[in-house]
Amino acid sequence: MQNNRGVRPKKTQQENIFASKSLSYFLQLTQTMNYTQAAQILGITQPALTQQIKKLERIVGAPLFYSVGKRLRLSEAGYTMLQTTNQVYSLLNKAADEIQQTTSENHGEIHLGILSSIESQVFEDFIVDYYRDNPDIQVSVHMLTRREIWAALESNKIDLAIMYLPDGSIKNWKPYDSKTIVTEDLLLIHNNEKLASKNKVKLSRLDDRKWVTYPVGFYLNDVITDAYKRELVASPDVAARFTQPGQIYRFLKETDTYTALPKSYIMSRYDRDEIMTANFEPKIKFDLSFVYRTEKQDIPRIDKFLTEFNNYLGDRDYFERLDDIVAKKIKNYDKN
């Protein structure tokens, strides 16, 4: 905007900070404390990220990070910037939520972030039914990693996260709430005839084959690793890592490997009766849950969405819905 002399006024320091992408890039870097990982999550190159951070440092007039060996640390100025930025974002998110709380339950958008390793078919079927009754609500689904989900929750880019709990990577639960959808069992998946008659298997019995599993940092990989630590058993050798359960299962079928996948994934497969599974001893359990900022439930369309999903599982529970999905798949397969 120009003044009455036709001269564009110089931007203030605040305008320089909030008009650039540097602030959101700074927040992402504080979460990973690793330029390579942060750049990958942001979908930019590492030099581009470095340039934005340097730009922000020039604006505030102080370095925000420093290195100790290969480890990145926040400077005093960085801590101040992080604390202040979180306070500003918290105020903005609160204002946005308060505004949305006055809107109609029958209009608007709902953004769902679903952990990419979760079997999503029950949610997809529900969203189809929900649209039929609520055609003016637009539901957007984002399949995300743990880090991406948490970043999206904090930045208000998603309203509801669907993820596994408990999750030790979440340090600050104060602004958030959760609702359990279903309790999952983690099952051993194998093609070892020697274990075919076993309903339960100890981790110590599984040292004769390599594993196929999720990448390091994925929730289920951490669950398996933690279970081995609790049982004081050496972690297994890993033959391959994939981000999707279908990829893991296909690799297992063609190799002499073990893996562990949630009961829901096995229940969702049309060939589930052919899959050899066993419970771990002791059992490994976790909860599939909605996670959201506490204020979100006061937004009419979010409250209605959660209520209708609860009613949806009240008619037929989560695993019964998976049974319905499999029955439909088999029926369509037989027709073809």
Image (tube, rainbow, N blue to C red):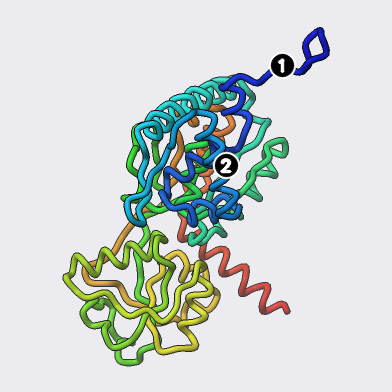
In the depicted structure, whether residue 75 falls above or below residue 207: above
Name the residue at 23% across, 83% down. Answer: 205
Count neighbours of disc 1 (C-alpha within 10 A) and say few if under 14, some if 14 to 19, many if 20 or more.
few
On screen, 167 above or below 155?
below
Q: Earlier in the sequence, mark 1 or mark 2?
A: 1
139 relative position to 158: left or right = right
The quarter of the rendered structure image containing the C terminus is bottom right
Residue name at image x 48 percent, y 49 percent: 162
Query: Judging from the image, what secondary structure is the residue with disc 1 in?
Result: loop
- Residue in the image at 50% along x and 49% along y: 148
Name the residue at the top extreme. 4
Q: Which residue is mark 1?
A: 9
Residue type, label 1: Pro
Camera-side residue: 10 or 111? 10
Kindly tell me whether residue 305 is visible in this rendering: no
Residue 302, percent from left and from top: 55, 34
* Res 304 visible: yes
Where is residue 5? Give x, y as percent. 82, 9
Which dot marks residue 52?
Answer: 2
**CA distance separating discs 1 and 2:** 23 Å
Q: What residue lies at 43% left-to-right and 67% top-to-bottom?
A: 215
